[in-house]
Amino acid sequence: MPKLIASRPSTVARSALKLFLRSIGSLVLLGLLIGASAWLYLHPSQSRISGIVYGQRQGHSLTFEALRPDKTNGLGIILMVSGRWKSSTNLFSSAIVGPLLRRGYTVFPVSHLSQPEATVAEIFEDVSRAVRWIRHNAADYGIDPSRLGITGGSAGGHLSLLLATRGGPGPAHATDPVDRESSAVQAVAIFYPVTDLIDLGSSTENLGDGGPPKSFVEAFRAPQGSGLQWSTIGRALSPLYNLSSNCPPTLIYHGDADTLVPLDQSIRYQERARSLGGEVELVVHQGGAHGWPTMIWDIRAFGAWFDGHLLKY
């Protein structure tokens, strides 16, 4: 009898341990399956061409990549690879645009020379050249040159909006046929862009002196000997002051806890655009700072936005 009593807890313990291990194993397997599914979703089958040179700046080659999914819809999305107006091919991962590739878009991540080596005005000139280059060579990538979308975040969102508000045909007399092409885009979907450099509001970059963002004074310097003042430079590089009635439909995701680029920047842009008859949709991410962990899934909404405004043409 004592032996029987002694053996029962041991048997129960062994059974409980086995059940626990099986549960852990099942959870691990489930986690692996979910992780593998997410990885596959964000890495659809594609071809990739890197190091395509679209221009030069101060002895540096300016490049972009072309990511083409196996099943294409014949449309292209340009990605501004830029944060704090700094750029590098190392800043880009194809997983970021996995949801767009899934929908059939050919994606063009565009890099530029970083500030302060290049000013923001020069960077804008260069990314405008990239759009013209892609449009001029659209047939090589199997895309429609009349329907280009653009995306990016922060500085990349700012550059996207500059192209949306200032993009247009190049000079007809330009020697290089690429420069004659239009730098306009037909749809925009971006994260937390700077829209007004003159009024930075509650931004941590605002010194309250009416000048440029405190960490980017060199990035916004005037060309030597030009005599340009900050008010002129700042307005020219602020999408808010370049809005017109024919700007492309725009989707903006912005966090309400962003202290670097306050939500007010996007609210005022939306209000101004709507007053001119433009289409700007603003999605406020509650508690979102200057970025949030689930942003990559918001790209799916960007894809739906591009579908609604590029595929319908």
Image (cartoon, rainbow, N blue to C red):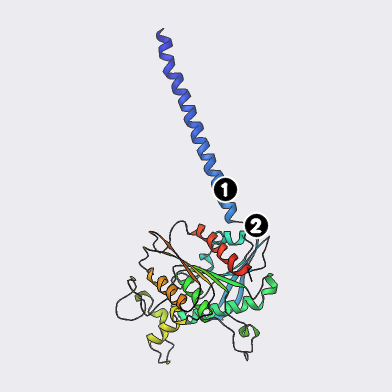
Q: Is residue 79 above or below residue 28?
A: below
Task: Determine which quarter of the picture holds residue 195.
Answer: bottom left
Q: Position of residue 35 (x, y in %)?
A: 54, 48
Q: Nearer the viewer, residue 194 or 279?
A: 279
Tell me if residue 138 can be seen.
Answer: yes
- Furthest residue toward top: 1
Tag 1 near tag 2, CB within 8 Å: no
Q: Secondary structure at mark 1?
A: helix
Q: Amino acid at mark 2?
A: Ser
Q: Secondary structure at mark 2?
A: loop
Tell me if residue 117 can be seen.
Answer: no
Whole-angstrom CA distance, mark 1 to mark 2, is: 15 Å
Point out which mark residue 36 bears.
1
Residue at numbered disc 2: 45
Q: Nearer the viewer, residue 244 or 93?
A: 244
Q: Position of residue 151 (x, y in %)?
A: 53, 69
How many C-alpha atoms fall within 10 Å of the one at disc 1: few (<14), some, or many (≥20)?
A: few
Q: Position of residue 291 (x, y in %)?
A: 43, 62
Point out which mark residue 129 bears.
none
Q: Amino acid at mark 1?
A: Ala
* Quadrant (top left, top right, bottom left, bottom right) of the N terminus: top left
Task: Determine which quarter of the picture holds residue 313.
Answer: bottom right
